[in-house]
Amino acid sequence: MNRPDIQQLYRAHHGWMKNLLVRKLRCPEDAADLAQDAFERLLRKPLSFDNVMGGRHYLSRIAHSLCIDLWRRRQIEQAYMESLALLAPECIPDVAEQQVIIDVIVKVDQLLSRLPRKIKRTFIAVQIEGLTYQQVAERDKISIGSVKNYLAQAIVRLTSFREEHHLD
C-alpha cells in the first residue's frame, strides 16, 4: 500500500476506528491516541488490501491488539504502583524513573508473552526466580537437558524478537 492509499484509508476509516475504540475503551482520549497509533503502524509496515473492507478488517485487528496492549500496560502499572506502596518513602524512585521502569517491565512482558508456555515457565524459573536447572527439572518433571533446551530456545527467540523490533 503506498502513501496515497494510506491517506485514503485514513480518511475513509479514521472516524469509524475512533468510534470503535471509544466503545471498547470508554475513553475518547485513549481512543484518539490508539487510532493514531494504528495508522502509524500502517505507515511503518505498508500492506495492500483487495478492497476497502479488507483495510477496515485489518484496522479492527490492529485496534484490538492495541487495546490489549493498553490494558496489559495498565495492569503492569497498577501492580508496580501496589509494589511501590510497600516500600519506605525514601526508597521510591521519582516519577521519571518510575516511567522508565514501567516501560522496561512492559517490554519484558511483551517479549515473554511471545514464548510458548513451557519455554516461558522455564525461563522465568531460572532467570527470575533463581531456581537451578535441577530444581526446575524436578518441579516440571522434565530432564535437565529439556531445561537447557528450553532456555536456549528462549534466548534465541527473545534475541531474535528484540533485534527485529529494535528493542534495546
Image (cartoon, helix red, strand yellow):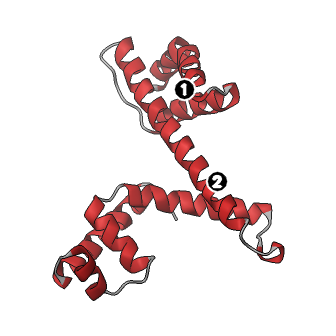
The residue under the point 79% across, 75% down is 88
Asked if labels 2 and 1 touch by Cβ distance under 8 angstroms, the answer is no
86 or 24: nearer the viewer: 86
Instruction: Assess disc 1: are there few (<14), some (14-19) or many (≥20) residues with their C-alpha within 10 Å of its C-alpha.
Output: few
Instruction: Assess disc 2: are there few (<14), some (14-19) or many (≥20) residues with their C-alpha within 10 Å of its C-alpha.
Output: few
Residue 65, numbered circle = none
18 or 6: nearer the viewer: 18
80 or 111: nearer the viewer: 80
The residue under the point 42% across, 37% down is 45
Asked if 61 appears above or below 144 in the picture, the reply is: above
Amino acid type at mark 2: Gln
Percent across and percent down for residue 163 are: 41, 61
Apparent side of residue 83 relative to residue 42 in the rendered image (left or right)? right
The residue under the point 27% across, 78% down is 139
Asked if 30 appears above or below 4 in the picture, the reply is: below
Mark 1 against mark 2, which lies toward the viewer? 2
Apparent side of residue 40 relative to residue 145 in the rendered image (left or right)? right
Quadrant of the snapshot with the N terminus: top left
Q: Earlier in the sequence, mark 1 or mark 2?
A: 1
Apparent side of residue 82 relative to residue 106 in the rendered image (left or right)? right
How many numbered callouts? Answer: 2
Q: In whole angstroms, how far apart are the C-alphas of marks 1 and 2?
A: 20 Å
Quadrant of residue 136 within the rendered picture = bottom left
Apparent side of residue 58 relative to residue 105 in the rendered image (left or right)? left
Mark 1 — residue? 24
Secondary structure of the residue carrying tag 1 is helix
Amino acid type at mark 1: Lys
> Is residue 1 among the parts visible in the rendering?
no
Mark 2 — residue? 78
Percent across and percent down for residue 54 are: 34, 18
